[in-house]
Image (tube, rainbow, N blue to C red):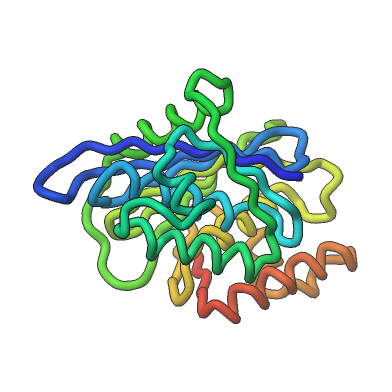
Amino acid sequence: MNHAYVDASWREEEAERGQGGWGLVLLDGGELPRRIGGQLQAPDNNAAEMRAVLEAVRSAPAGQPLSIYSDNWAVLHAIGKGKGPASLWPVRDEVLDLALTRNIALRLSYVPRTRRHMRAAHDLANAARLGQHSGPLSGPWAEVNLDLREGSQLARVALRRPGERVSAEVPLDPLDPLPPSAQALLAAAALAQPGETVRVRRASKLARALWDNPLRSLLPAAQARLLAARAQADSAGVVVEFE
């Protein structure tokens, strides 16, 4: 079973509107936990907390059970018991529909913020809420920066779209048939929303070449991974461009 610790941060800016951030720590059997955070406009903290749950379901491996841990009873009751504020129901339904589509059996539990991974999720949410934008974006597209350091087991993926900023630490598997740069690129493509054009900066020439033509890889397992990622992007209307 995979495990996700989720939390949110929110500050009111005007009536029923504020700046929010969500964070999650995903333990999915990898050597290192995945830490993901994002920024959004939200009417209240509960909405930001529900978004964190949605991103956990979106990020977890398909076809495997997922335990989600939160310190927000409103969100837990909305998903687990169908109770709570009506404002949470649309995203709650999106969570349940996505879990069904991805064949993920959900289990929800309360844990206090004092737990180690919950503290990390809270820190991610705070950092996301306080993130600075370089300017508004228009249209259904996003910018992605890839940061890979030689010899590191982690790559940093930072995505920016209108009104939202998402960052993720991606564990790099030295035994993966894909080179590290391609592993990071596939993680970036997975953060895209349906119909979105993703403009990727700092992608290596190798990662670009493999994305443009998966058959350039000499390893069948790598070809299969790349072809599957391309097919998923195409079916969702996601376009990946390079700068």
Which one is nearer the viewer's eye here, 232 or 102?
102
In screen coordinates, is 60 left or right of 238?
right
| x 69%, y 56%: residue | 105
| x 73%, y 72%: residue | 228
In screen coordinates, is 173 left or right of 241?
right
Name the quadrant of the N terminus. top right
The answer to whether residue 33 is above or below residue 18 is: above
Tell me if I can see residue 182 in this picture: no
| x 45%, y 76%: residue | 195
- Relative image position of residue 39 (x, y in whole percent): 35, 46
Q: Give the quadrant of residue 35.
A: top right
- Relative image position of residue 10 (x, y in whole percent): 28, 38
The answer to whether residue 90 is above or below residue 23 is: below
Which one is nearer the viewer's eye here, 125 or 183?
125
Q: Residue furthest left?
A: 14
| x 17%, y 40%: residue | 12
Q: Give the quadrant of residue 210.
A: bottom right
In screen coordinates, is 226 left or right of 140?
right
Which one is nearer the viewer's eye here, 24 or 229?
24
